[in-house]
Amino acid sequence: MQTLYTIDTSEEQAQGNKFNKLLDKHLEQSRQIFVYLIHHIISIARYAETDSRLRSSKHLPSKEDLNVNIKIAGNEIVWKILEDSSYQRAVAEIKPQHWDNDELIRKTYLQLVEAPVYKEYIALQERNKKSEKNILEYIFTDLMLANDDFMSHMDDTFLHWDDDAEMMNQLVLNFLQKPANADFQDMLGAEKRKFANDLLQTVLEKKEYCLELIKPKLKNWDAERIAVLDMILMEMGVCEFLYFDTIPTKVTINEYIDLAKEYSTQQSGHFVNGILDNIHKDLLAQDKLHKVSHKKS
C-alpha cells in the first residue's frame, strides 16, 4: 500500500523493476525500525548492569547501592536474541545504537524498577518463560509505546514510524512470543516477499482494468476526488479477487476495510467495504472468481 501510494503520488512513472526496488526499500525501512525496537528493549533491560556499576562506584555507596538487582539483565529471552546470529548481523549492518537516546533509556529503566510488575519479577527465585516474556512485553507496551518522549523520539528518528507503528506493535509482540522463529535478515520470508512483489506488480499491470470495474460502482462520486489511498486499496482488493486464488474473498474484504480505517479517512472503511462487496457480487455472478477451497474435506 505504501509503495503504491508513493508511485501514485510521484511525478515519475515506475519503469522495469523500479517499483520492486521501491518496495524493497520500504521493507528495509520497516526492518530497521523492528531491529531498533528490539535493540531498545534490550538496552533498557541491560541498563540494570550500568545502574549497578554507577551506584556501587559512588564515594559513599549505601547498602542499596551495593545490592542492585540485575536479574533482568540476564533475561533468558534477551540473551537468546543477543546470541542469535541473524540479530548480530542485523546490528552490525544497521547499527541501531546510533539512534540511541541514553537519557531516555536511563529514565525508562528507572520507571521500570519502580513498577510493581518489576518488583514481582525480581522477587521470583526461578526463571520461567512466562515471566521472562511478560517483563519484556511490559517494557515495550507500558514503558515505550505509552511514553510520549519515546514516541517523539521514534517520530524524529524514523520517517515512516507513523505508518509502521501499528504493524510494529504486533510484530514485536509476536516476536516476544516466539523469538526463536525470527530472522532479522528477512522479516517476511521468501513466500511473503514473493506475494508482496506479485501483488505490487499485478496492481500496476492491471490498474486500468481494475478502474473499469471500480468506476461504475462509484455512483455520484467523482473518481478524481476520492482519497488516493481508498482507490489504491480498492485496486488491491480487486486484484486479490481476480488473480490470487488462494486468498478467501472474506479475508480480502476484511483486511482492506481495516487498512482503510487505519490509514485513510473516517468514512473510508464503510466506503471501501461497499465498493469491494459490490464488485465481488458482480464477479461471482459472472463466474469470474475461482478460489481454492479452504474447507476441510
Image (tube, rainbow, N blue to C red):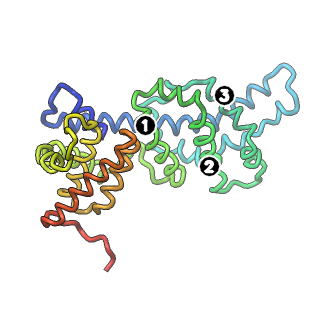
Residue 61, percent from left and from top: 85, 25
In the image, farthest residue toward the front: 220
Identify which residue, 133 or 221, lies in the foreground. Answer: 221
Looking at the image, is mark 3 or mark 1 earlier in the sequence?
1
57 left or right, relative to 193: right
Q: Quadrant of residue 233?
A: top left
Pointer 1 residue? 90
Amino acid tagged 1: Ala
Q: Position of residue 199 (x, y in %)?
A: 23, 48
Residue drawn at (63%, 23%) of the image: 103
Q: How would you rate the neighbour count of disc 1 (Cα within 10 Å): few for under 14, some for 14-19, many for 20 or more?
A: some
Q: Residues within 10 Å of mark 3 (few under 14, many from 20)?
A: some
Proximity of marks 3 and 1: CB atoms separated by less than 8 Å: no
Residue that carries the numbered disc 3 in the rendered image: 106
Cα–Cα gap, marks 3 and 1: 24 Å
Left or right of 29 on screen, residue 87: right
On the image, which quarter does residue 160 sit in? top left
Circle 1: element type: helix
Residue in view at x 33 percent, y 59 percent: 251
Picture coordinates of residue 248, whole percent (x, y): 29, 63
Disc nearest the viewer among 2 and 3 = 3
Q: Is residue 89 visible?
A: no
Q: Give how far apart the Cα atoms at labels 2 and 3 are.
A: 21 Å
The Cα–Cα distance between marks 2 and 1, rounded to whole angstroms, is 20 Å
Identify the residue at horizontal 63%, vertical 44% (top origin): 138
Q: Which mark is residue 76?
A: 2
Closest to the camera, between mark 3 and mark 1, is 3
